[in-house]
Amino acid sequence: MKNVILYVRVSTDEQAGRGYSLRDQEQKLINYCQTNNLNILEIFREDYSAKTFNRPEFKKLLDYCKKNRKEVHQLIFIKWDRFSRNTGESYQMISTFNELAIEVNAIEQPLDLSIPEQGLMLAVYLSIPQVENHRRSLNVISGMRRAFKEGRYVGSAPKGYENGKDSAKKPLLVPGNDAKLIQEAFELISTGLYNQIEVMNKLRKKGLKISKTPFSNLLRNPIYYGGVPIKAYKDEKECVVAGIHEPLITKALFEKVQNVLNNRRGKHHTNHKKVNENFPLKGFLICPKCNNPLTGSTSKGRSKYYSYYHCISPCNGRYHLEDANFWIYDYLKTLSLNTPAKVLFENMLQEALYSEREKKQLGAKHYENVKNIEAKIERLQDIYIDGDMDKEEYQIAKTRYENIYAELKEKETEATNQNEVLELYKKAISKTENIDNQYIKGDIDTKRRIIGSIFPNNFQFENKKVRTADINPSLISIASIHRASQGLKKKDKSKKIDLSFTVSAEGFEPSTACLEGRCSIQLSYAPIFVLKLKWKSLIVGVAGFEPAASCSQSRRDNRATLHPERIQNSGE
């Protein structure tokens, strides 16, 4: 009596779509063994694809045969496609069993491999499953690419999405539980204040489960702004098409993140995984001698510790920590909008937007052009359907008209979004209100975000002040409006006379005494303009004025607010 091993295998799709089952195969093999007086040693059951022999149960089967090679005479299964769907690997595995003196055969496709001609049938039995697999693979690829081109993402849902279905029961991506965390990831990276590790660690604390490489790939995936990436295949090039799923971010935000990742903009963070809370300007501040970024450290003197922002190169450029903190706070005070200045700036923006809206007001001709383009696209489709135009010509003409149509629609969108734009501006302006106090009371992340938004690139101090050439130009305008509003508030209103303002040549700097008569302030005047707001006119300085030297008493009061212990030690 021969000893045999039974092997039954089925893949999930075969079991669902073609009626295969492990129990049915097993019963047929048991009946065969009873009829042919064969002794069953073991039965190995597999639910796995047969593309390779890297299958859990088949590995166990092979180990069993190697350990019991003298007891096992045959390995039998239903058909050869249950054994394998890879012709090359099948021959190698058959040779392995032959070396163990174990016969391999299928009960529904039996072969006597001792007869040379039977080898031809073996080749047929082994190649047919591989051909079927290849054809099935091509059909799947074709179907998936067709779905991708229609804007429908098929496959495992990326982080932030879940696999859902639309009304037609077709696959559709829907936002998942991690959607808000993905949005936050893009927003944080777009600021340029954080590197990927810092953002990933922040989101991990909030529950996002992801590792370093997948997170990096996530930030470059166009699926999140509504695009569907299609890989290159044969003669087709790689491309991104518009998807039908709900985007988590805007395309503008996605492109901004790509610019930051590609180092097209200045970095507002260091490569350190953790930023020292005592040195919020680290990575922003530039050496006054060699223009390299400064680092920060604390050293012990004879009686106390001293902290500096210093250069790591031999140039020895440095700033005392307390001086740097005072100078940056002193400058933030000039940017901090008070309530009257904020209202004034909002009114200016509203007037500017209203003026822009009037310029972009769409007339009847615009809507007539829209209808003409729509009609041309319809005629173009009819010509193509009738066969009077080939596909290439149709695509060229269609693209040209669709581009014109998109431009016309974009003008309509711009004309109707003025209120949204104004609200966004107001939200941004509110961030500058009391920005100096926000900086003092904020944590390290808040401080670095404030500094990063003010300085497009790194900055340095000049004459114990922030070098204004490095400042965001819009913030310089905000500072000038603030100073101008303060000047208006202090203006003497006791005499109601009609004044005519004239400006002398550039560079005229009159000397003016301070209230206490202890110092003089150099005022540098710039051109002025008249802002007309419905019922009144306001005289506003564009650049205002900047004191070249501040009052000693005022500076002493500010310094005492920031560092009272330093003032006490110095005896002031």
Image (cartoon, grey):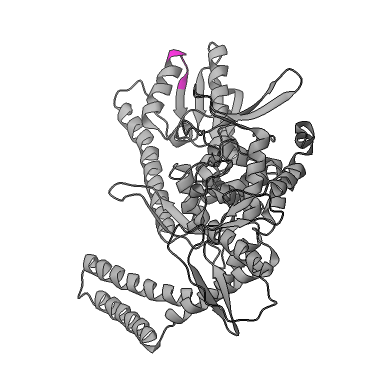
Q: Residue at x 75, y 23 (%)?
A: 304
Q: Residue furthest top?
A: 70
| Predominant SS of the magenta segment | loop
Horizontally, residue 83 falls left or right of residue 341, namely: left
Which region shows up in magenta? 99-103
Q: Quadrant of residue 511?
A: bottom right
Horizontally, residue 374 falls left or right of residue 348, namely: left
Measuring from the top left, give residue 411's x and y in whole percent. 42, 75
Measuring from the top left, give residue 318's x and y in whole percent. 57, 30
Q: Quadrant of residue 380?
A: bottom left
Horizontally, residue 456 falls left or right of residue 402, namely: right
Number of marks in picture: 0
Vertical side of 101 occupied by 512: above or below: below
Q: Nearer the viewer, residue 1 or 18?
A: 18
Q: Is residue 233 magenta?
A: no
In the picture, the quarter occupied by the N terminus is: top right
Measuring from the top left, give residue 524's x and y in whole percent. 52, 57
Q: Nearer the viewer, residue 347 or 171?
A: 347
In the picture, the quarter occupied by the C terminus is: top right
- Residue 37 appears in view: no
Q: Quadrant of residue 405?
A: bottom left
Q: Residue at x 64, y 58 (%)?
A: 432
Q: Residue at x 60, y 82 (%)?
A: 536
Q: Residue at x 38, y 52 (%)?
A: 142
- Residue 455 appears in view: yes
Measuring from the top left, give residue 482's x and y in whole percent. 62, 62
Vertical side of 310 occupied by 154: above or below: below
